[in-house]
Amino acid sequence: MTDAMFFEKIDGGDVRCGLCCHFCRIRPEKRGICGVRENDGGALKTLVYGKLIAMHADPIEKKPLYHFMPGHLSYSIATAGCNFRCLHCQNAEISQIPAGKGLIPGEFVEPERVVAEALAAGCISIAYTYTEPTIFFEYALDVSRIAADKGLKNVFVSNGYLSEEAARTIEPYLDAINVDLKGDDGFYRKVCGARLEPVKRTIELLWRLGIWVEVTTLIIPGYNDSDATLRDIAEFLSGISPDIPWHVSAFYPTYKLKDAPPTPAKTIRRAAEIGRRAGLHFVYDGNVPGEEEKTTCSACGEALVERFGFRVARNGVVDGRCPACGEGVPGVW
Ligand code: SF4
Ligand code: SF4
Protein backbone atom coordinates (compact mmCIF):
# COMPACT_ATOMS: atom_id res chain seq x y z
CA MET A 1 0.00 0.00 0.00
CA THR A 2 1.22 3.48 -0.87
CA ASP A 3 0.30 6.75 0.83
CA ALA A 4 -2.55 8.47 -0.97
CA MET A 5 -2.76 12.17 -1.76
CA PHE A 6 -5.76 14.40 -1.11
CA PHE A 7 -7.35 13.22 2.11
CA GLU A 8 -8.23 14.58 5.50
CA LYS A 9 -8.83 12.84 8.79
CA ILE A 10 -12.28 13.36 10.19
CA ASP A 11 -13.93 12.13 13.39
CA GLY A 12 -14.09 8.53 14.54
CA GLY A 13 -11.02 7.46 12.58
CA ASP A 14 -12.78 8.13 9.27
CA VAL A 15 -11.05 9.87 6.38
CA ARG A 16 -12.44 12.00 3.56
CA CYS A 17 -10.89 11.37 0.14
CA GLY A 18 -10.53 14.47 -2.02
CA LEU A 19 -9.27 12.84 -5.21
CA CYS A 20 -12.57 12.70 -7.04
CA CYS A 21 -15.93 14.38 -6.79
CA HIS A 22 -17.46 11.53 -4.84
CA PHE A 23 -15.46 12.84 -1.84
CA CYS A 24 -15.98 9.51 -0.09
CA ARG A 25 -16.09 9.35 3.66
CA ILE A 26 -14.25 6.12 4.41
CA ARG A 27 -14.52 4.23 7.70
CA PRO A 28 -11.49 2.52 9.24
CA GLU A 29 -10.27 -0.47 7.20
CA LYS A 30 -12.84 0.25 4.46
CA ARG A 31 -12.44 1.33 0.84
CA GLY A 32 -14.00 4.14 -1.16
CA ILE A 33 -16.45 3.77 -4.04
CA CYS A 34 -13.61 3.05 -6.48
CA GLY A 35 -12.54 0.09 -4.37
CA VAL A 36 -8.84 0.96 -4.66
CA ARG A 37 -8.33 3.48 -1.82
CA GLU A 38 -8.42 2.22 1.73
CA ASN A 39 -8.50 3.79 5.19
CA ASP A 40 -5.56 2.11 6.89
CA GLY A 41 -5.70 3.12 10.55
CA GLY A 42 -6.71 6.72 9.81
CA ALA A 43 -4.43 7.22 6.80
CA LEU A 44 -5.65 6.85 3.22
CA LYS A 45 -3.67 4.44 1.04
CA THR A 46 -3.83 3.68 -2.64
CA LEU A 47 -3.91 -0.01 -3.49
CA VAL A 48 -3.06 0.39 -7.18
CA TYR A 49 0.20 2.36 -7.19
CA GLY A 50 2.20 0.89 -10.08
CA LYS A 51 -0.04 -2.19 -10.36
CA LEU A 52 -0.42 -2.18 -14.10
CA ILE A 53 -2.83 -4.44 -15.91
CA ALA A 54 -2.22 -2.98 -19.38
CA MET A 55 0.78 -1.48 -21.17
CA HIS A 56 0.88 -1.14 -24.92
CA ALA A 57 1.38 1.26 -27.78
CA ASP A 58 -1.84 2.57 -29.39
CA PRO A 59 -2.49 5.14 -32.10
CA ILE A 60 -3.48 8.44 -30.44
CA GLU A 61 -6.57 8.35 -32.69
CA LYS A 62 -7.84 5.42 -30.61
CA LYS A 63 -8.23 7.54 -27.46
CA PRO A 64 -9.74 9.40 -29.42
CA LEU A 65 -7.61 12.55 -29.76
CA TYR A 66 -7.74 13.89 -33.31
CA HIS A 67 -6.16 17.31 -32.90
CA PHE A 68 -3.19 16.22 -30.84
CA MET A 69 -0.17 15.32 -32.97
CA PRO A 70 -2.11 13.05 -35.37
CA GLY A 71 -0.67 9.70 -36.33
CA HIS A 72 1.62 9.18 -33.35
CA LEU A 73 1.82 6.19 -31.02
CA SER A 74 0.85 6.69 -27.40
CA TYR A 75 2.08 4.28 -24.74
CA SER A 76 -1.11 3.34 -22.96
CA ILE A 77 -1.30 2.17 -19.36
CA ALA A 78 -3.98 1.32 -16.81
CA THR A 79 -4.50 -0.15 -13.38
CA ALA A 80 -7.68 -1.84 -12.22
CA GLY A 81 -10.54 0.21 -10.82
CA CYS A 82 -12.91 3.06 -11.60
CA ASN A 83 -14.95 5.54 -9.63
CA PHE A 84 -17.98 5.03 -11.94
CA ARG A 85 -20.28 2.03 -12.29
CA CYS A 86 -21.32 2.42 -15.93
CA LEU A 87 -23.77 -0.26 -16.98
CA HIS A 88 -22.28 -0.15 -20.48
CA CYS A 89 -18.59 -0.31 -19.49
CA GLN A 90 -16.56 -2.02 -22.20
CA ASN A 91 -13.75 -2.70 -19.73
CA ALA A 92 -15.84 -3.86 -16.77
CA GLU A 93 -13.59 -6.84 -16.08
CA ILE A 94 -10.77 -4.44 -15.19
CA SER A 95 -12.68 -1.31 -14.14
CA GLN A 96 -15.05 -2.84 -11.62
CA ILE A 97 -13.40 -4.00 -8.40
CA PRO A 98 -15.69 -6.24 -6.34
CA ALA A 99 -16.82 -4.67 -3.05
CA GLY A 100 -15.04 -5.77 0.12
CA LYS A 101 -11.42 -6.69 0.48
CA GLY A 102 -10.92 -8.44 -2.84
CA LEU A 103 -7.45 -8.86 -4.28
CA ILE A 104 -6.53 -6.22 -6.84
CA PRO A 105 -4.93 -7.58 -10.00
CA GLY A 106 -1.80 -6.09 -11.56
CA GLU A 107 1.95 -6.32 -11.68
CA PHE A 108 4.19 -3.66 -10.15
CA VAL A 109 6.01 -1.61 -12.75
CA GLU A 110 8.40 1.21 -11.75
CA PRO A 111 7.41 4.60 -13.24
CA GLU A 112 10.85 4.83 -14.87
CA ARG A 113 10.21 1.56 -16.70
CA VAL A 114 6.97 2.84 -18.22
CA VAL A 115 8.82 5.83 -19.63
CA ALA A 116 11.72 3.70 -20.88
CA GLU A 117 9.34 1.27 -22.60
CA ALA A 118 7.36 4.13 -24.16
CA LEU A 119 10.55 5.55 -25.64
CA ALA A 120 11.72 2.12 -26.83
CA ALA A 121 8.36 1.57 -28.56
CA GLY A 122 8.71 4.84 -30.48
CA CYS A 123 5.84 6.55 -28.61
CA ILE A 124 5.81 10.28 -28.11
CA SER A 125 3.15 10.36 -25.44
CA ILE A 126 1.89 8.30 -22.54
CA ALA A 127 -1.86 7.74 -22.28
CA TYR A 128 -3.47 6.98 -18.95
CA THR A 129 -6.54 5.16 -20.17
CA TYR A 130 -8.77 2.03 -20.44
CA THR A 131 -10.08 2.35 -16.87
CA GLU A 132 -10.04 5.74 -15.09
CA PRO A 133 -6.69 7.47 -14.57
CA THR A 134 -8.00 9.50 -11.63
CA ILE A 135 -8.05 6.44 -9.42
CA PHE A 136 -4.35 5.72 -10.05
CA PHE A 137 -3.53 9.39 -9.73
CA GLU A 138 -0.40 9.13 -7.55
CA TYR A 139 1.21 6.77 -10.04
CA ALA A 140 0.05 8.77 -13.07
CA LEU A 141 1.56 11.88 -11.50
CA ASP A 142 4.92 10.18 -10.90
CA VAL A 143 5.02 8.68 -14.41
CA SER A 144 3.97 11.94 -16.02
CA ARG A 145 6.68 13.96 -14.26
CA ILE A 146 9.37 11.58 -15.48
CA ALA A 147 7.81 11.41 -18.95
CA ALA A 148 7.71 15.22 -19.24
CA ASP A 149 11.34 15.34 -18.21
CA LYS A 150 12.22 12.98 -21.08
CA GLY A 151 10.25 15.05 -23.60
CA LEU A 152 7.15 12.85 -23.75
CA LYS A 153 3.62 14.24 -23.65
CA ASN A 154 0.97 13.01 -21.21
CA VAL A 155 -2.68 12.43 -22.02
CA PHE A 156 -5.63 11.32 -19.91
CA VAL A 157 -8.70 9.53 -21.17
CA SER A 158 -11.09 10.23 -18.36
CA ASN A 159 -14.64 10.40 -17.09
CA GLY A 160 -13.78 13.90 -15.85
CA TYR A 161 -14.71 13.28 -12.21
CA LEU A 162 -11.39 14.30 -10.67
CA SER A 163 -11.56 17.06 -8.07
CA GLU A 164 -10.36 20.55 -8.83
CA GLU A 165 -7.40 20.05 -6.48
CA ALA A 166 -6.37 16.92 -8.38
CA ALA A 167 -6.87 18.63 -11.75
CA ARG A 168 -4.68 21.55 -10.74
CA THR A 169 -2.01 19.16 -9.43
CA ILE A 170 -1.69 17.20 -12.67
CA GLU A 171 -2.08 20.27 -14.89
CA PRO A 172 1.64 21.16 -15.23
CA TYR A 173 2.34 17.70 -16.72
CA LEU A 174 -0.89 17.07 -18.62
CA ASP A 175 -0.92 18.01 -22.30
CA ALA A 176 -4.27 16.69 -23.47
CA ILE A 177 -7.36 14.93 -22.26
CA ASN A 178 -10.37 13.25 -23.78
CA VAL A 179 -13.31 13.51 -21.40
CA ASP A 180 -16.49 11.50 -21.72
CA LEU A 181 -19.55 13.71 -21.45
CA LYS A 182 -22.08 10.97 -21.24
CA GLY A 183 -25.55 12.45 -20.95
CA ASP A 184 -27.81 14.46 -18.66
CA ASP A 185 -27.78 14.27 -14.88
CA GLY A 186 -30.41 11.52 -14.90
CA PHE A 187 -28.16 9.43 -17.13
CA TYR A 188 -25.20 9.95 -14.81
CA ARG A 189 -27.23 8.91 -11.77
CA LYS A 190 -28.96 5.94 -13.35
CA VAL A 191 -26.27 4.53 -15.62
CA CYS A 192 -22.94 5.64 -14.08
CA GLY A 193 -23.53 6.12 -10.35
CA ALA A 194 -22.29 9.72 -10.55
CA ARG A 195 -23.43 13.28 -11.30
CA LEU A 196 -23.16 15.51 -14.35
CA GLU A 197 -22.06 18.86 -12.90
CA PRO A 198 -18.53 17.86 -11.75
CA VAL A 199 -17.79 16.55 -15.26
CA LYS A 200 -18.84 19.84 -16.83
CA ARG A 201 -16.73 21.76 -14.33
CA THR A 202 -13.68 19.64 -15.17
CA ILE A 203 -14.05 20.19 -18.92
CA GLU A 204 -14.33 23.93 -18.45
CA LEU A 205 -11.48 24.14 -15.92
CA LEU A 206 -9.01 22.12 -18.00
CA TRP A 207 -9.83 24.05 -21.16
CA ARG A 208 -9.30 27.35 -19.32
CA LEU A 209 -6.01 26.01 -17.93
CA GLY A 210 -4.80 25.54 -21.50
CA ILE A 211 -4.88 21.74 -21.70
CA TRP A 212 -5.99 20.42 -25.07
CA VAL A 213 -9.49 18.98 -24.51
CA GLU A 214 -11.58 16.73 -26.74
CA VAL A 215 -14.93 15.28 -25.65
CA THR A 216 -16.63 11.97 -26.43
CA THR A 217 -20.30 11.05 -26.14
CA LEU A 218 -21.26 7.41 -26.62
CA ILE A 219 -24.86 7.46 -27.76
CA ILE A 220 -27.09 4.72 -26.35
CA PRO A 221 -30.56 4.43 -27.90
CA GLY A 222 -33.29 5.20 -25.38
CA TYR A 223 -30.82 6.51 -22.78
CA ASN A 224 -29.08 9.63 -24.05
CA ASP A 225 -30.12 9.98 -27.70
CA SER A 226 -32.83 12.64 -27.45
CA ASP A 227 -32.37 15.87 -29.39
CA ALA A 228 -32.64 17.79 -26.11
CA THR A 229 -29.83 15.86 -24.40
CA LEU A 230 -27.53 16.06 -27.39
CA ARG A 231 -28.26 19.75 -27.89
CA ASP A 232 -27.51 20.48 -24.22
CA ILE A 233 -24.13 18.75 -24.52
CA ALA A 234 -23.25 20.45 -27.81
CA GLU A 235 -24.33 23.90 -26.60
CA PHE A 236 -22.42 23.48 -23.36
CA LEU A 237 -19.21 22.67 -25.28
CA SER A 238 -19.77 25.38 -27.83
CA GLY A 239 -20.33 27.85 -24.99
CA ILE A 240 -16.83 27.09 -23.68
CA SER A 241 -15.31 27.07 -27.15
CA PRO A 242 -16.53 26.03 -30.62
CA ASP A 243 -13.01 24.64 -31.12
CA ILE A 244 -13.48 21.72 -28.70
CA PRO A 245 -13.71 18.60 -30.90
CA TRP A 246 -16.78 16.49 -30.13
CA HIS A 247 -16.69 12.76 -30.91
CA VAL A 248 -20.14 11.16 -31.09
CA SER A 249 -19.81 7.43 -31.14
CA ALA A 250 -21.97 4.36 -31.52
CA PHE A 251 -22.86 1.95 -28.72
CA TYR A 252 -22.78 -1.84 -29.04
CA PRO A 253 -24.64 -3.91 -26.44
CA THR A 254 -22.28 -4.86 -23.64
CA TYR A 255 -21.89 -5.67 -19.92
CA LYS A 256 -25.18 -4.79 -18.14
CA LEU A 257 -26.74 -3.04 -21.12
CA LYS A 258 -27.04 -6.04 -23.41
CA ASP A 259 -30.74 -5.31 -23.97
CA ALA A 260 -30.23 -1.85 -25.47
CA PRO A 261 -29.95 -1.91 -29.29
CA PRO A 262 -26.82 -0.80 -31.15
CA THR A 263 -26.84 2.86 -32.20
CA PRO A 264 -28.13 3.30 -35.77
CA ALA A 265 -25.85 5.26 -38.10
CA LYS A 266 -28.66 7.78 -38.63
CA THR A 267 -28.65 8.62 -34.90
CA ILE A 268 -24.93 9.35 -35.06
CA ARG A 269 -25.47 11.58 -38.07
CA ARG A 270 -28.33 13.38 -36.29
CA ALA A 271 -26.08 13.97 -33.26
CA ALA A 272 -23.31 15.31 -35.49
CA GLU A 273 -25.76 17.66 -37.17
CA ILE A 274 -26.94 18.91 -33.76
CA GLY A 275 -23.30 19.54 -32.85
CA ARG A 276 -22.67 21.55 -36.00
CA ARG A 277 -25.87 23.54 -35.54
CA ALA A 278 -24.75 24.36 -32.00
CA GLY A 279 -21.69 25.97 -33.57
CA LEU A 280 -19.05 23.31 -32.93
CA HIS A 281 -16.37 23.46 -35.61
CA PHE A 282 -15.13 19.89 -35.29
CA VAL A 283 -17.65 17.10 -34.86
CA TYR A 284 -16.61 13.51 -35.54
CA ASP A 285 -19.16 10.76 -36.16
CA GLY A 286 -16.98 8.03 -34.66
CA ASN A 287 -16.96 4.27 -35.13
CA VAL A 288 -19.50 3.95 -37.93
CA PRO A 289 -17.84 1.20 -40.00
CA GLY A 290 -16.45 2.15 -43.40
CA GLU A 291 -16.78 5.90 -42.88
CA GLU A 292 -13.87 8.24 -43.30
CA GLU A 293 -13.37 10.94 -40.67
CA LYS A 294 -11.99 14.20 -41.94
CA THR A 295 -10.86 17.38 -40.26
CA THR A 296 -11.74 20.36 -42.40
CA CYS A 297 -10.71 23.98 -42.03
CA SER A 298 -13.35 25.89 -40.09
CA ALA A 299 -12.77 28.98 -42.27
CA CYS A 300 -12.54 27.70 -45.87
CA GLY A 301 -13.62 24.03 -45.70
CA GLU A 302 -10.32 22.65 -47.03
CA ALA A 303 -9.80 18.96 -46.12
CA LEU A 304 -6.88 18.94 -43.68
CA VAL A 305 -6.62 15.52 -42.03
CA GLU A 306 -8.05 12.30 -43.47
CA ARG A 307 -8.45 9.18 -41.36
CA PHE A 308 -9.61 5.63 -41.94
CA GLY A 309 -10.25 3.85 -38.68
CA PHE A 310 -7.30 4.72 -36.42
CA ARG A 311 -4.98 5.35 -39.39
CA VAL A 312 -4.13 8.84 -40.55
CA ALA A 313 -4.08 8.72 -44.36
CA ARG A 314 -3.05 12.36 -44.78
CA ASN A 315 -2.22 15.26 -42.49
CA GLY A 316 -2.17 18.50 -44.48
CA VAL A 317 -1.92 20.93 -41.55
CA VAL A 318 1.20 23.08 -41.97
CA ASP A 319 2.68 24.74 -38.88
CA GLY A 320 -0.73 24.56 -37.19
CA ARG A 321 -2.45 26.34 -40.10
CA CYS A 322 -4.64 25.56 -43.07
CA PRO A 323 -2.37 25.67 -46.15
CA ALA A 324 -5.21 27.00 -48.32
CA CYS A 325 -6.31 30.05 -46.31
CA GLY A 326 -3.84 30.34 -43.44
CA GLU A 327 -6.48 29.93 -40.70
CA GLY A 328 -5.10 28.47 -37.45
CA VAL A 329 -6.24 24.91 -36.75
CA PRO A 330 -7.01 24.44 -33.05
CA GLY A 331 -4.99 21.69 -31.41
CA VAL A 332 -1.39 20.58 -31.07
CA TRP A 333 0.21 19.80 -34.43
S1 SF4 B 1 -11.04 8.39 -5.64
FE1 SF4 B 1 -13.19 8.98 -5.55
S2 SF4 B 1 -14.28 7.05 -5.38
FE2 SF4 B 1 -12.17 6.61 -4.82
S3 SF4 B 1 -12.11 6.86 -2.60
FE3 SF4 B 1 -11.53 8.83 -3.49
S4 SF4 B 1 -13.44 10.01 -3.58
FE4 SF4 B 1 -14.00 7.83 -3.31
S1 SF4 C 1 -16.08 5.62 -16.52
FE1 SF4 C 1 -15.30 4.40 -18.21
S2 SF4 C 1 -14.03 2.79 -17.24
FE2 SF4 C 1 -15.34 3.70 -15.65
S3 SF4 C 1 -17.11 2.35 -15.52
FE3 SF4 C 1 -17.61 4.07 -16.90
S4 SF4 C 1 -17.12 3.33 -18.96
FE4 SF4 C 1 -16.10 1.96 -17.48
Image (cartoon, helix red, strand yellow):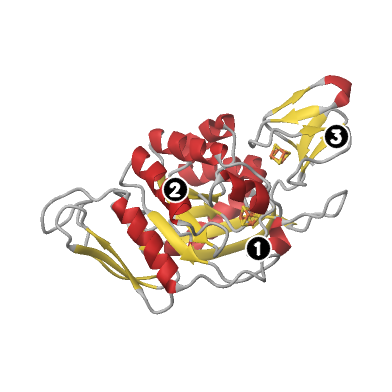
Q: What residue appears at the point 53 percent right and 36 percent down from the top-left corner?
A: 170
- Amino acid type at mark 1: Asn
The picture quadrant for ligand 2 comes to bottom right
Cα–Cα gap, marks 2 and 3: 40 Å
Q: Is residue 132 visible?
A: yes
Label 1, secondary structure: give it.
Answer: loop
Q: Which residue is mark 2?
A: 233
Q: Is mark 1 within 8 Å of ligand 2?
A: yes
CA distance for labels 2 and 1: 24 Å
Label 2, residues with CA under 10 Å away: few <14, some 14-19, many ≥20: many
**Label 2 CB less than 8 angstroms from ligand 2:** no
| Quarter of the rendering containing residue 236 | top left
Which residue type does callout 3 highlight?
Answer: Asp
Number of callouts? 3
Q: Earlier in the sequence, mark 2 or mark 3?
A: 3
In the depicted view, which residue is nearer to us: 109 or 9?
Answer: 9
Q: 10 Å neighbourhood of mark 3: few (<14), some, or many (≥20)?
A: many
Residue at image coords 55%, 63%: 220
- The residue where tag 1 is placed is 91
Instruction: Residue 165: give x, y in percent of width and height.
Output: 57, 29
What is the CA distance from the residue labelled 3 to the residue labelled 1? 28 Å
Give the structural element (helix, strand or loop) at label 2.
helix
The residue under the point 32% across, 49% down is 278
Residue 58: give x, y in percent of width and height.
Answer: 49, 65
Residue 259: quadrant of the picture? bottom right
